[in-house]
Every structure is written in C-alpha cells, then in structure tokens.
Amino acid sequence: MSSVSYHISNLLEKMTSTDKDFRFMATNDLMLELQKDSIKLDEDSERKVVTMLLKLLEDKNGEVQNLAVKCLAPLVSKVKEPQVETMVDTLCSNMMSDKEQLRDISSMGLKTVIAELPLTSSGLNLTVGVCKKITSQLIGAMGKQEDVSVQLEALDILSDMLGRLSGALVSFHGSLLSSLLPQLTSSRMAVRKRSILALGHLVPCCSPALFSQLTGHLLTELAKGPPTSMTRTYIQCLATISRQGGHRVGEHLEKLIPMVVKFTSVEDDELREYCFQAFEAFIRRCPKDMSPHVATVTQLCLKFMTFDPNYNYDNDEEDEEDSMDIEDGLDEESDDEYSDDDDMSWKVRRSSIKCLEALISTRRDLLLSFYSSICPALLTRFKEREENVRADVFAAFSTLLRQTRVGLSHHSLTAAGSDSGPSRGDEEPAVAMLKKQVPVIVKALHRQLKEKSIKSRQGCFCLLTELAHTVPGALEQHIPALIPGIVFSLTDKSTSSTMRIDALSFFHVLLLSHPPQAFQPHMQVLLPPVVACVEDSFYKITAEALLVTQQLVRVMRPQGQTATAGGFDPKPFVKEVFSVTLKRLKATDIDQEVKERAISCMGHMVCHLGDHLRTELQGVLTIFLERLKNEITRLTAVRTITLISASPLKIDLSSILHEALSVLGSFLRKNQRTLKLGTLACLTTLVTHHAASIKPAALEPVLSELPALVDESDMHVSQVSITLLTCMAKAGPSSLAKISSSVLPGVFRLVHSPLLQGGALAAILDFLQALVLSKTSNLGYSQLLKSLTDPFHSSTDTSIIHRQSYHSVARCVAALASVCPKEAPGTVASLIQEVKNPGSPEAARVLALLCLGEIGRTGSLGGSKEVQGVILEAIASTNEEVKTAASCALGSMAVGSLNDYLPFLLKEISSQPRRQYLLLHSLKEVISACPASSLSAHVESIWALLFQNCKCQEEGTRNLVAECLGKLTLVNAAQLLPRLKQQLKAGCPLARSTVVTAIKFTIVDQPAPIDSLLKDCIGDFLKTLQDSDINVRRVALVMFNSAAHNKPSLIRGLLATVLPHLYKETQIRKDLIREVEMGPFKHTVDDGLDVRKAAFECMYTLLDSCLEGLDVLQFLDHVEEGLKDHYDIRMLTFLMLARLASLCPAAVLQRLDRLIEPLKATCTTKVKAGSVKQEFEKQEELRRSAMRAVAALLAVPEVERSPSMADFANQIRTNADMASIYQSVQGGEGGGFGPAESMDMS
C-alpha cells in the first residue's frame, strides 16, 4: 500500500512543477497507474489525486488539460462516492464559468464521468447519486438564458446522460421535462435542436403519463397556430419522440395525424419536410395503428412527391428516341439554369418519397394496392432532376420489388417444381401487375444509364438487378435497349471502379436470369468492353469481369448444341476471349479470387468451346494440372476438371489423366470435406466418361483410399464413394477384384447400420447389383447373400441388431435376386422354409418375411398360394415382431401383384377383427406405394371397407384408417374429396375426427393436383374447430397445423375466420379440469390440455408461415396467457417469444412489461426440497427455456430502456445461479432456438 501511496505522492508533487513537460509526463504516468486493475488508493491519496486533477483542468497548457480529462475516466471506478461527487460538483460549477476554455474542458470532463458511471446494481447508488447532482446543476444551467453556449453544453451533457442512464433518473423525469419544454421556444435554433435530442432520449424510459403530457403539450402548442419557425420545431420534436418512443405514439395518433396533415398545406418547404418525416416515423413505429390513416398519408405523399414549383418538366415528354442526341446537349445547360440555391422543394419531394418507402416496407399486406397507386407514381418520378431525390425514388421502387419477392418466396413452396402445373396460370397478382410495368420501367431507365451522374447510374443498376431477381426473364424483350447503357458504364473514361463493378454484376445477373439466345445477336458489342475489364489493373473489376466472361462463353454455345446450331457461330470471338483468360490463368502473382475465377472461366471455355482451341488445348490442361497440385487453387481445379470431363465435346484428357488420378487419390486422405466430396464427384465423372483411356494401374492410388471413406460417421461421403465404386464396377470389373476384401466389410457394416436410408441405401443397392453382374470370380451371388444375412442367424444376441437394418438387408437381398433370375426361386424357397421352421431364431424369421415382401414387391412371386399361407400363418403368430414383419411383407407383395393380393387382403380385413390393425398397415403400404392408375379399379371397394371402420373405438386403428383414406383421396381427388366432405355431417364424433385426420394426410409438402380442390373446401373442414366434441376440435387443430406448415397458401385467406376459434382454444377451461382420487392422494386431471397444446403449436407454426396475416399484438395477448399455463405450453410459448423477439421486435417491446413478469417468475422459482428427480429436471428445463427467451429479448436493440427489463437483467447478472444458466444458454445456443427445430410438426 505504502509504496503505491509513495509513488502517487511523488507524481502529485511533479504535477505542481513550473515546467509544463514535467506536469505532462507526471499526469501521463498517473493515467497509466490508474488504468491498472490492481491499484488501490487510500482515502488520503484519493482526495489528493482528485484535487490535483481538478486543478490541472485549469492548467495553462492545453495538452496537460486534455490528459487530465482522460485521467477522470479510470478514476471514477477507483475512488469512493464522496470523491466522485466532489469531481462532479467542481466540473459543474466550472461549466458555468465565464472562461470559454474552462467551460469546454469541464463539459468534456462531465461527459467522460457519465460514460464511466457503473450500470451494475452494486454501483447503482453511486450512479443515482451522481446523476441527481449533475441533473439539478444542469437544470439550473439551462435556465441561464443569458449565455447560450452554457445552455448548449448543458443540453449536450443531458442528452448523453439520458441516452446512457435514463433508468437511473426516473425521479427526475418530471422536472427534466418541465425544464426542457420551455427550451423548445428558445430564439436560438441550436438550442431548440439540442432540446429535441434530449427529449428523444427521455422518451423511451419515461412513464406513460409523462409521455401523454409531452404529446399533449406539443398538440396544445401546435393548435395555437404558432409562427412557422416554431411549428417546425414542434413537428420535428414529434417525429423524434415517435422514432424514439416507438409504439407509445400509437394511442395518440387519432389526434396527431389531422394536426400534421393540416400543416402540410402551409407554404413552407422545411415544415413540409418535417411533416413527412413525422409521418414516416409513425408508419415505421406503429404500422398497425396507422392503418386508418394510410390512405390519407399516401394521397399526401403522391401529391408532394411531384412538388417542384420552380421547374417545368413538360419539355422532357417529347419522344425520347428521336431527339436523344440534341436533348443530351441541352440538358446540361437547362440543369444549370435551374440549380437555384434557395430552392428547398427537393427536400419536400425527398421526404415524401422516403415516407412512401416506409409504407411499402412495413405493409406487405397492401402490396396490390401499392401496385395500382404508388408504382405508376414512382415510375413518373424516374425523371426527377435532383440527383439525391432520384436515388431515393430508385430506392423506394427497389423496396417495392423486394417486398414482391418476399411474397414470392412464401408461395414458392407451393409453386416449386410445377412449372407445367396449374400454378403457372395463377401467378401472384402482384407479379402480373409488375410484368405489365416492365416496358415503362425500361423506357424510363435506359436513358439514365447513359447520364454522367454516377449515383443515378448506380441506382438504375441496383433497381434493374432487383427486377431481374424478382421476375427472371422479364427483361428479355428489352435487352437491346439496356445494352448501350451497360457498355457505356464499362467504357466511359470518367467512370469510377465501383461503377464498373456495379455494371458488371448487373450484367452477370442479367445473363443468369435470361436465355442465351437473347444475347447472341449483340455479341459484337458486348464482348470487347468485358474483355477490356478482364485486363483491368484493379483485381475486383477483373474478378467480376471473369464471372461475366464465363457466362458469355455459355451464351456463345449453350450446353448440348452442335457447332453452329441456332445460327450463331462463336468462332470469331473465341480467340479474343481465350487470350485474355489465358493471360490471367498463367499469372501467379494475382489475387486469389482472380486465380479461381480464371480457372473456372477457362474451364467453361474448354467445356463449351474446346473444339475451337485445337493446339492450345494441351497447354491449358497442363496448367490445370499444376493448379490441381497447388493447395490454394486445388478445389477450384477439381471442380473445373469435373466440368471438362463431362463435356459433350469429349475433350481428350489422356495427357494429364494418369498424373491427375494420383493427385486426386491423395486428396481423399485430406481432412477437408468439401475437397473430398468434390474429388469423389470428379473421379466418378472421369471413370464414367473416360474409362477407355484409364489403365487399371492408374486407379490404384484411388482404390487404396476408398475403404476408409465407407463409414457411417459420414453418410454422404459414403454414398458418393459407393457410387464411384459402382461406376468402376461397370467400367472396369478387373480393378475391383483386389478391393473386395477391403471395401466390402465396410459396405456390409453400413447395411447393418441403423443410420442407413435414402440415397446411401440406393447407392449400395446399385453397387451390389453391379458387383454381381461384373462376374468377379470371388464375389458371387451366394457369397454376397451369406454375408448379408449371417448376423441374423448367429446364435449370439440378436437384440443388438437395429430394426432399420432388417429393412436395409431385405432391400439388398431383393436387389440381388432381381438381377439373378436363375438363383431367385431357390432363394425364395429357402426363405419360406426359414419362416415355417419354428426352430429358427426370431431375427431370421423376421428377416425372411421382409425379404419375401421385398422380392414380392417386384411382382416376381405372382399369387403363389404357398406364400399367402405362410404370411397368414405368421400374422397369426404370437410373436409381435414376426406379426409386424408379416403385415409389412403382405403389403409389399400386394404392391407387386395387386390383383392377386388386394381382394384377399380386403376380405381378411373385414373378416378378421382381431388382426385388423396389422392388415390395415398392409393396406396403407399398398395405397402409399401403388401408382394411381393401377389402384383406380379398386378404389370403391377399399373406400367402402375403410368407412366401415372409421368409427372404431381404438384410436390407433382410427388413425390408420384416416391415413389410408387421406392417401386414397389423392388417387382421385375430384371424386373423393366431396365424399369426405359429406361425411362431416356424420352423427358420430369418432367418424368426424377420422375424416378431419384424413384431410391432414391429403396435405403433402410437394405440389399436388389436389391443392386447388383443397383450397376451395378446406374452410368447410376447418369449421370443425367449432365442433362440440373436444377430440374433433383437437384433430382439426392438428390438421390446421399441418396445412400451415406444409402448404400455408391453403389457409392464408381463411385466417380472419379461423384465428378467433384458434385463440379460443388456447384458454384454460375450468369445466374440463377434474379431480381424481388415487388412494389417499387427490390428483388434478386437465382434459383440455391436449387441445390447448395443439392450439399453441398452430400459433408457433403460423409465426413462420403466415406472419403477415397475424395481428401481432392480439397474438401476444395469448402468448402472455400461455406463459402462465402448464409446463408443456410454457415451453412452447418461450420458444414463440424468442421467435417473436427476432421477427417483430417493435410489438414485443410494446408488451414488454407484461411479458417479463411470468419469465421472471419461472426463472426464480425453486422446486420444493422433497420433490422427485423428474420435478427438478422439469423445472431446470423450464428455467433454461425461459432464459433462452430472455436472451432473445436482450438481443433486441434498446430493450434495456424499459426499467423493468433493465432491472431483471441486473438481477440475472448479480444472481450467480441465474447468471450461470444465462451463460450456458448464450454459449450453447447463442440466444438460440435450440429445441425449435426438433418440434414435431407432423
């Protein structure tokens, strides 16, 4: 301690020196000391240091003063409260001093102190104390009307303090408001502006009463009709408090809007600008509350966006095409004549256009009306003379395009992949309206693409890029009009590099989104400027130009065309493109991006135009081989070689093939997964297309690496490796003989793995078939069969064999039997014996049944009576596993020979009630797997049978019947859907619930013919949400959830009618809660829980798929109720809250105070000491889930301005238990939505 005190007193002594350098160095050393965490000062030293630093603030030397201010920052956290208060007192009184320099340095000092005050609860007393001191002094300073600079400093410091510590000043909010309001009438503009800023910082934390007082004051003042300069101030203040206070303005809009509308008619440009800024703030902060006023505001914006009293646009309307050249000359002069410095009308135009942009971006639901009202108006403003305003017009129009695209991505789920289907005809109405406007857009823009103004051109390119993304192909007719503009931007000498990059990237998007034929006629004009850009010295331009060149190569000869198909001959252009690309390809001292793009571009050249390169080709291939060996460029080179080897031009790769294979083989050992996958794809292409030129020895380095890649730890790599092996087996069987011993064990391990399914399984089936057909000596049918089935026959414990592997092995056996027709009958006979033999192990019998089913699926068993007998016997078995396998097998066989098995199956279902469940499983398999054409003959008989069973008491059976009904409806929707609808009138609730569940199974996530029919009648099925039977309501909710998840377009239009019923089901109903006596204990059972859970699950799904159809505040009311409900429902609502915090933060902030209480309650609840382990685990999981929601809320900007949230955040930081949960949630899932993905959305 003493040594520190000694050191400090030494420094203090030097600070009194007459030599300014001594004082400077001593202060600097003190600052370094204070910055050390370890330093502790005793009371005496604290007092001395503070006194000395405050004295140095008045030092004659400016540098010493500045250093002294910097020392204050670390000092605040090192000294006790009285010293900080001394500092603040002195600084405040100095701030009122007459000396300007002292005033400035003191206000800097105060700002420094404010920035360092602690926010944690431990330091809160200090902060509150200091703030009180400063505030009372500042309020005094603001009252000093005679000295404006003191006022300005005081306001500035106050803004800083309110911005950072508004929560600590709650008790002062009232007095601050009453001292700030008079400042709005100050004669000095600067004072008024700073007062507005301070009020803006005050608003987010103040109480609703104060907020109302503030808006009331502004309204009263405005109603008095003050002078224009004052009105400006009040309107500006309104806009600021609306931006800062957000949703709170909502309840005052009714009074505010007419007032602001009135002032737009005052002839004052700046006032009008502020009015529109206020409108913009209202729209962005309270989009829902603004709904009644949207029409009024839109009308005003449309009126004032053309407001330009000093300029006449009429002469621009002449036909552009004819007078283009003459006009260009005139334009420049006329613009100069009118650039009147006093003309402020552009500010009005700009603010009204920004207001429109806010409207477009917040109200997607009004998109169609925007296309009819706002879109044409914006198009007419493309001719705006003021560059900045024109940029805003482009930005607003781009927002309109983006909003259209958001709508498209919502609907793309239903339209994807069905280009030929009905969904092309009824495209989005907004897109149809946009397509009609495309010629107008191009007409307005193509002229501006040649203007000198760079900002305008960039705006045009941005807008056109958005257009090409939103409606690909829409610009095809207009390409001739756009090309001169692109070429101009690429060749104009005065163009900046960013302009060139923008032009190139737009051209790239244009090439990608339009057919090659559209560009071929213009090749002569397009190619030279792009080639010149490839040679540019700036690497970003070169990289962008290479991308464009790559697309132009595709245009010269699209894939699959012969030499001169389509009447376009690429020959004249090849040399020019080749030489510049080669120059870039050879260079090694260039940027990585350019290297990669040069390789890729040259690859496309070889692939599309290789026959034009003749002698140069070998040189290029050699360079590719070098790039393949270089670690930096190897991945791009692998992809390029893949491209070239698949080229329809059959490029001769023999010169590099041998060496490339050994390099590629070495890549399979690397740890980089993308490289592995790229290499495997490349090898597969090489083996497929160039097998003739590959010698078996050349494949050695590859073959030796493959066994290690076939492993269940990475299924995708395994799948691609096995596909490569299959290609090898087909191309050169001899090479496989050596590896059978090393690769096959891995393949069989995969077959027996529980993880095998889908693509990897299909790859293995192909491989085994290729292997048997390749007739490699030691890999015959019987050996493979034995290796596959052995684990199921061994006497060791078969319980470790996973159920999935039975199905995988059965598929493999069937695949082998299908390619060896001679061997198959023997296999079938032995399988039948296996099933009949009561002594064989259960695993072997189950496998044999599944194998028979899979072999029968191909139809090769016919209607063999023996097999039928064996299966029926197995279904009657006492062993559950055998029964299930038999029902599976029966279904598979019926798929293979429908007419033999289906009547038999239906007869069994109606005559054997005890086996009904298993036999219905078989029927489900038949309906799911058979093509509609072969099923249609049997539809009636199946339908009748299912309806006999739809009232079954057993829920499992009913669900199966419903699934069969739903899948059967897909076979002939037009005929069967109306019949399902008829059944809704059934008297029995069980039958109704079966029908509603059947509808769930007609909603598939791919586009299907039933979609349009479903859309018309799903409303009738959703009426069951009002059914009197609680179970029917539950299954209706599950069906609605499925529709919202898989095909939101079906229910979007019905939300207004469905949501009230959905919300009604989220409420706890007392009449459904009953008490059950269990021995001495009473236990509460809530029969409504499942329905509530289903309702909340629907709400969660709607957040993702139909957000724009929800009234978020009303939605939040029900989320809030759910936060206090049962464990399962709370878990769901915590997830919803986290999701809402990221999707619509403004609405969540509006309800924050009500949402925090239940979260706080959950996080602080403790389980009773004697509870069971499950209770502890449940509570822990709840707390973690609640904490995730809190973390998501804390990620919302400005959230801690809410006093209750700031308080809760402090509580979390200071409570060790909560802090550790918060840390783990933050670290593990990043405020994340961990369990959201695993929610069951069936």
Image (cartoon, grey):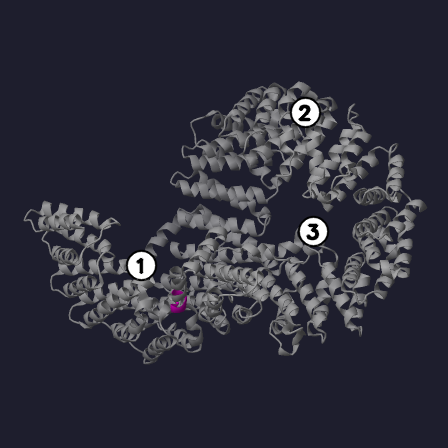
The quarter of the rendered structure image containing the C terminus is bottom right
**Coordinates of residue 911 in the picture (x, y in percent):** 91, 60
View extreme (right): residue:
865
Left or right of 982: which side holds 44? left
Write the start and end of the magenta stretch as one range: 1202-1206
Report the amino acid beneath label 1. Asp
**Coordinates of residue 748 in the picture (x, y in percent):** 72, 35
**Residue at the disc numbered 2:** 690
Q: Is residue 594 visible?
A: yes
**Residue at the disc numbered 1:** 340
Q: Nearer the viewer, mark 1 or mark 3?
A: 3
- Label 2 SS: loop
**Residue 843 marker:** none
**CA gap, disc 2 and disc 1:** 73 Å
**Coordinates of residue 582 in the picture (x, y in percent):** 51, 26
User: Label 1 crowding class (10 Å Cα cut-off): few <14, some 14-19, many 20+?
Assistant: few
Left or right of 537: which side holds 897? right
